[in-house]
Image (cartoon, grey):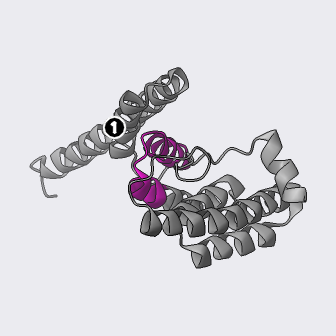
């Protein structure tokens, strides 16, 4: 009979220790991600969008796989800070994570209208209609209404810039409207006309 020198037992113990360390690291990362997510939500609700963005970025860093709640927080924070390029990227990522998220598709449509990319806005309207249901239809109708207004407003903005470039801001015509992906009660009524 051969005597074991103990290498096999040492190997098994080492594997178990490594597995436990990996598990502990995973739980620590999840705990830190969850805490950063809660902090980001609280800061966002208070209106401190820069600090909320930093918290959501930390949560994203410690998220082991894409997380819809973290991505939603990033998108909303970027939007609140008027960082439209990063907001668009985040809403696109959110739409991939949650393909039936009408609010994300609506936000992408609003961002397309803001950029005067009406073909992309039309794609978002189509995607919203394909979702079906009341929510998809309401968002699609509101987006259609905003796109029509945006086209007219964009035409006059461009005309005024060419004809009278030094003209001061005209409220409702030359100023940029903030992008808000949350349907207001007036938005739903606009879409029904």
| Rendered location of residue 17, percent (x, y) | 25, 39
120 lies left or right of 185: left
The magenta-colored residue range is 68-90
Front position in the image: 141 or 135: 141
* Image location of residue 173, percent across then percent down: 59, 53
In the rendered structure, the answer to whether residue 136 lies left or right of residue 24 reads: right
Picture residue at 51% right of the left edge, 20% below the top = 46
Along the viewing direction, whichever of 69 and 50 lies nearer the viewer: 50
Which residue is outermost to the bottom?
A: 119
User: Which residue is at the front of the view, 38 or 147?
Assistant: 147
Please, what is the dominant secondary structure of the magenta stretch? helix
The picture places residue 69, in percent across and down from the top left corner, at: 55, 43
Q: Inspect the magenta stretch and tell me whether residue 130 lies in it.
A: no
Asked whether residue 52 is in view, the answer is: yes
Q: Classify the position of the N terminus by image quarter.
A: bottom left
Can you say whether 18 is above or below 112 in the image? above
The location of residue 130, given as percent across then percent down, is 79, 73
Would you say 19 lies left or right of 106 here? left
**Direction left: furthest residue:** 5
- Which residue: 39% across, 38% down? 59
Which corner quadrant holds the C terminus?
Answer: bottom right
Residue at x 39%, y 55% (from the top left corner): 86
Tell which of 125 and 19 is nearer to you. 125
- Residue at the spot of label 1: 58
Packing grade of label 1 (10 A; few <14, some 14-19, many >=20) is: some
Q: Residue at x 43, y 69 (%)?
A: 162
């Amino acid at each position: 009979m051969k005597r074991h020198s103990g290498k096999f037992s040492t190997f098994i113990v080492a594997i178990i220790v490594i597995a436990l360390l990996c598990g502990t690291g995973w739980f620590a990362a999840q705990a830190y991600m969850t805490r950063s997510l809660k902090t980001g939500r609280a800061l966002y609700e208070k209106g401190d969008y820069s600090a909320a963005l930093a918290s959501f970025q930390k949560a994203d860093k410690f998220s082991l796989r894409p997380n819809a709640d973290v991505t939603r927080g990033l998108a909303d924070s970027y939007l609140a800070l008027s960082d439209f390029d990063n907001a668009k990227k985040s809403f696109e990522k959110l739409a991939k994570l949650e393909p039936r998220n009408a609010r994300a598709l609506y936000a992408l449509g609003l961002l397309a209208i803001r950029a005067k990319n009406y073909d992309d806005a039309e794609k978002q309207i189509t995607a919203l209609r394909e979702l079906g249901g009341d929510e998809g239809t309401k968002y699609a109708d509101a987006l259609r209404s905003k796109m029509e207004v945006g086209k007219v407003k964009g035409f006059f903005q461009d005309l005024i810039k060419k004809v009278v470039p030094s003209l001061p801001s005209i409220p409702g015509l030359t100023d940029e409207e903030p992008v808000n992906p949350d349907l207001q009660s007036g938005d739903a009524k606009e879409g029904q006309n």
